[in-house]
Amino acid sequence: MKAIYLDCFSGISGNMLLGAFLQAGVPVSYLEQELQKLPIAGAFALHTEDAVKNGIHAVYVDVVLLDDGEHHQDQDHAQDHGHAHGHHHHAHVHRTMADIRAMLEQSKLSMPVKQTALSIFERLAEAEGKVHGKPADEVAFHEVGAIDSIVDIVGTAICLDYLEIDQVFASKLNLGSGFVPCAHGLMPVPAPAVAELTKSFPTCQREVEKELTTPTGAAVVNVLAHYSASLPQAFVTEKIAYGAGTWDLDIPNVLRMYVGTYTGSLSLERCILEANIDDMSPQIYGYLYDALLAAGALDVWTTAIYMKKNRPAQKLSVLTDVKKKEELAGILFRETTSIGLRVIPVTERLECARHLARVDTRYGSVRVKVSAWRGELVNVSAEYEDCRAIAEEQNIPLKTVQREAVQAFYARLGK
């Protein structure tokens, strides 16, 4: 499979990623052409130039905002986004995740690019929402709302698609250290959103007193990358590229990107916990399902079986990440009559790219799940809880609301 390895010894940001992709062979003209498919295409221009950082030749990318009258002055965003890595002296509009989702869905970008960009935006929105104490769709925050962040994330998705990258690996992230000024005063490095996005990924804070990893860079790694302390053994390098940041440091302020093929296998680190139960009240199962899912189980199901002496029974199955195995096993032993569990490794899992969209129907606003496989739209389904709430409130059939929501989404796509 085609793969890249991101060596983040000097951090990672959106424009460092774009610079590395351009040096790796993505034509600037192609990137600009695809970005023109965004509704905000008239609000920005790409500026690229060669840069030398401590003797290393890299490509520097900046998003230059044009005076189209649609944005407000918002200088404090520069620090939230990572002034260190470009996109400085800009003005910005505050957009919500809901605004950006609608923008991408209505664009003429390919389905793989939309799906990748949306998955990064949604993770970033979750982190910012948690920091600000608001629902991800509602919080109007700088990082997702600013044009340069939109260009960085959509541009990254475009470049990954152009190079046909199937797998992303990343090194430990150098976050930097110290404090940076923002709208709320001095903020410690890493900024709260970066801390949230990197809490499960190996990081370091080497002696540079600058913000080296921005929320955009952290979100890309969070969503797309597998950690590897060094270049994976099964990685065959074909090209090495460098994307430049703005800082002049004792270390080169660049992102090093290895481009090549990966011939190894990836461990998904998932397993199924399984038990056959023939002596437990069925009343317990509903309570048990809720407890397991609340604790982080990915899925829970039961299958009707017959056990010894032809006893009707249930095979209880719990799909989980390996790191949750012990915690979920404890719940199963405490809450059920089982005294033993089978642990079945999940060696491979194929899944559609998915995102949540929101559509307006004559009955109200409904979320819909959108799924794609190999870039092709394969399924659209309305969120049950949204439809149920509307059906109950307005005394109309549930299936009517579901059908209306799906039709509204296809209408948005012109289908």
Image (cartoon, rainbow, N blue to C red):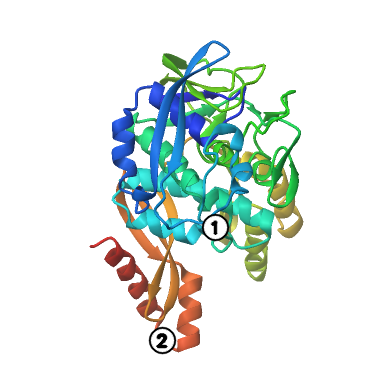
Please indicate whether residue 3 sits to the left or right of residue 84 in the image.
left
Q: What residue would you read off at disc 2?
A: 396
Residue 361 visible, this orientation: yes
Q: State the CA–CA distance, disc 2 to disc 1.
A: 30 Å
The circle drawn on residue 199 is none
Q: What residue would you read off at disc 1?
A: 301
Q: Residue at x 68, y 53 (%)?
A: 131
Q: Earlier in the sequence, mark 2 or mark 1?
A: 1
Residue placed most toward the observer, 86 or 401: 86
Residue 298 visible, this orientation: no
Please indicate whether residue 6 sits to the left or right of residue 279 in the image.
left
Please indicate whether residue 75 sits to the left or right of residue 351 in the image.
right
Residue placed most toward the observer, 38 or 170: 38
Q: Secondary structure at mark 2?
A: loop
Q: Residue at x 46, y 40 (%)?
A: 152
Quadrant position of the N terminus in the picture: top left
Please indicate whether residue 187 sits to the left or right of residue 414 in the image.
right
Q: Secondary structure at mark 1?
A: strand
Which percent across, then down, holds residue 190? 70, 38
Which percent across, then down, holds residue 322? 63, 39
Q: Residue at x 54, y 61 (%)?
A: 137
Q: Quadrant of residue 13?
A: top right
